[in-house]
Amino acid sequence: MPLIGFLINPVAGLGGTVGLKGSDGVAEKALMLGAVPRSGERALLMLNQVRRKDILFFTCAGPMGEEILKKAGTSLINIIHHPAPDTTAADTREACRRFLSENVDLIVFCGGDGTARDVFDVTGSQIPVLGLPAGVKMYSGVFALDPSAAASVLDNLESTGRRDAEILDIDEEAYRSGTLATRLYGIARVPVLGEKIQPAKNIFEEQDEERAKDEIARFITRVMLPDTYYIIGAGSTTERIATHLGVKKTILGVDVLMNGRMVAEDADEKTLLSFLDEKTPARIIISPIGSQGFIFGRGTQQISAEVIRRVGLDNIIVVATPAKCRATPSLHVDTGDPSLDSAFPESLQVISGYSIARRKNVGR
Amino acid sequence: MQTKILLDEEEIPRRWYNVLADLPSPMDPPLHPQTQKPVGPGDLSALFPMELIRQEMSPDRFIDIPAEVRDVLTLWRPSPLYRAKRLEQFLKTPAKIYYKWEGVSPAGSHKTNTSVPQAYYNMKAGIERIATETGAGQWGSALAFATMLYDLQCTIYMVRSSYTQKPYRKSMMHVWGAECIPSPSTKTKSGQAMLAKDPDTPGSLGGAISEAVEDAATHSNTNYSLGSVLNHVCLHQTVIGLECREQLQKVDDYPDVVIGCVGGGSNFAGISFPFAGDKMTGKHKEIDIIGVEPASCPSLTKGMYAYDFGDVAGLTPLLKMFTLGHDFIPPSIHAGGLRYHGDSPIVSRLVHDGVMRAVAYHQSEVFDAALTFARTEGIIVAPETSHAVKAAIDQALECRKTGEAKTILFNCSGHGNFDMSAYDAFHAKQLVDYEYPDELIKQSLARLPKIS
Ligand SMILES: Cc1ncc(COP(=O)(O)O)c(C=O)c1O
């Protein structure tokens, strides 16, 4: 019997319907403007498509889960938290702490990037999470494509794999004024459905995330050039490259390596530029972040437009595991410098294994 | 206008054509894996019967096909040459497109053209068992058929991922009485080493070759057989091009463009060597000869022309060829038969010399072409073959632009009846367009020490 922690952020998505771009801290204003909560509906859509009847749900009383579960006709419900009427992020965190102590197999939450961060604050990468998109901003990589995709994860939970998914921190204030500033907040684990098994000639794309990361790292470390600065972006795939070199990388930050050694840890833009002042060649190794496939978002504050210009567009190496590639239909750049954005080629090569790459279009 | 241009059984070639005789200078010899000295016939005698070794090194322009072998070839030869009228109309091209249909053989591809003579010479030499490898299963089934004809035992090391995912090719091998083992296996030292390194490995063609070579080298009643790459294999396949030349002559035509897909190079060699001979001897200097490979495994277009091993373990002689490196495991494209790190040394040499050229395509565009072909000419080709179809269509479309009425000939090397899941994947938009990161590799290779 699968144990699922289930929670709904009842105010997720409120801001969007009344043009507020996000709901963090503005729920009340949104409700006053006539916003209608819709995260419950989304959750119901999913629950109605779940076929199995053996799931035990742990959830919160009232609108944070119980009501919708009952509406969907679910009977195996275990209430672990009773929130006050005006639910807050603290309720989400408290629920997640309870989920952890109940040893649930998966947490399914219905919300947006803000909810994802609240969940991650408690769970980290200890147990897998799955977001049901209902917020305004869903740039984090933890969200299922739609309610039916989430339902089939639940139906096939026992045969799912796991992959890393970035949780993004998005500057709400800036976002409301029209600027997308994303920052990597943490790396959670999400369940992934196994590819449909096809009796084809030779399918052996690496399905195992950890092996895939090793293959990529083995290849990149083999083609790294001497006396060259390698600016290595955030994320767990790029981290593995450093591990293969015997170097400990800051997973959320940007590091600089040369000849297999760390020369600058968690570097900021100024530090990066100071290296690029010299005549030494440099490369950037980067992995797409989140569901939108950002390789250079404005939030990658360290790897700024100026840094990219100095390194040169030809010297960017993009890496991503096959599972990540599947979850990321195209790459995205938004450096804050439109002329640089448009200088990017139509498509980039993404290294996804040992000597193996694939093409991905670049959106901007 | 004739759709099928047919020959009588009497017109099956009596001699294979050896293009080595028409090369302007000798080939770089294969080198012994340990001593790095040119290999002699004795070095190969643990693996091959003497007649095949002789053919591998022969300077003779023509080599007789034994009557017993020709007799078996009559089961499917001469194969038909088609004029692709419906495809031409669909493409609105002024070009004339011909295709040689090799899918009529019992195993469904050109591979039986060499499996039969190879089994025959081994039988003649008193060999009792043949070991080989197979990637997608085409070669394994062709050799199973041939060894059955001559009462030889046959052990086939099949790349593990295909073994589990392509059950019907395995069934064919069983019908014809062969033993089929997933590779890497525990039966050989090299297989054990590969498993020790990575118990979950999906296997590779280069790895399966190591196992089959080791099996043959360590059993005195057993020889090894390779389905592509080697000179004698290419030699046996020249019946394809020789027939084509006769067939085209019957309709008073001669190709401007000759096309074949390239895995190890044997079907491409088969259709093109007679024409490459015409080109090198000055009879038809202008002919354009094009080998087509996958963008994910682009040995001719992106590889290095250098000495390399034919297998993972480094048991085979070093061959001078275009290679991506013997440790390269190509990604999982559906054209399993094109997933080989190297290429025929003769094809490599001719590409290097500019007698032939090569192009590479992604897998979704070649399946798109295969669909066009199936919907005009009716034949559902193997994923390998679809690469040649794509290049032929591109040439014909180019003619539409320029208004030239070129004669395009391509080798339709096999049918795709056991590859329908690949077509399903195409329809479901599940095909990934893999490519080879050649820039990164070239930058780093430039500083590697030269091997030998
Ligand atoms: C139908 C078909 N065509 C082509 C090939 C490629 O081999 P080669 O380059 O030796 O012709 C294969 C190999 O399995 C095949 O099955």
Image: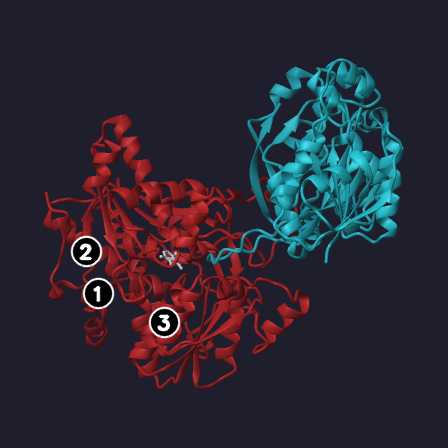
Chain colours: A cyan, B red
Q: Is residue A211 left or right of residue B308?
A: right
Q: Amino acid at mark 1?
A: Trp
**Amino acid type, mark 2:** Pro
Secondary structure found at label 1: loop
Q: Are marks 2 and 3 in contact (CB under 8 Å)?
A: no
- Separation of residues labelled 1 and 2 (CA atoms): 9 Å
Which residue is denoted by mark 2 in the rendering?
B80
* Amino acid type indicated by mark 3: Leu
Q: Quadrant of the C terminus of chain A?
A: top right
Q: Which residue is mark 3?
A: B143
Q: Residues within 10 Å of mark 3 (few under 14, many from 20)?
A: many
The location of residue A122, given as percent across then percent down, is 87, 42
Protein chain holding label 1: B
Mark 1 residue CB less than 8 A from any atom of ligand 1: no
Q: Position of residue A239 (x, y in %)?
A: 78, 44
Tag shown at residue B76: 1
The yes-or-no answer for disc 2 within 8 Å of ligand 1 is: no
| Nearer-N-terminus badge (1/3) | 1
Residue B346 in percent (x, y) is at 38, 56
Residue pictured at 80% horizontal, 36% vertical: A62
Query: Depth check: A326 or A337 in front?
Result: A326
Above or below for B303 versus A300: below
Asked if residue B444 shows in the view, the reply is no
Instruction: Examine the rendering and report whether any part of residue A114 can be seen.
Output: yes
Query: What is the chain identity of the residue bearing mark 2?
Result: B
Kindly report the distance in space between the C-alpha atoms of the residues bearing marks 1 and 3: 16 Å
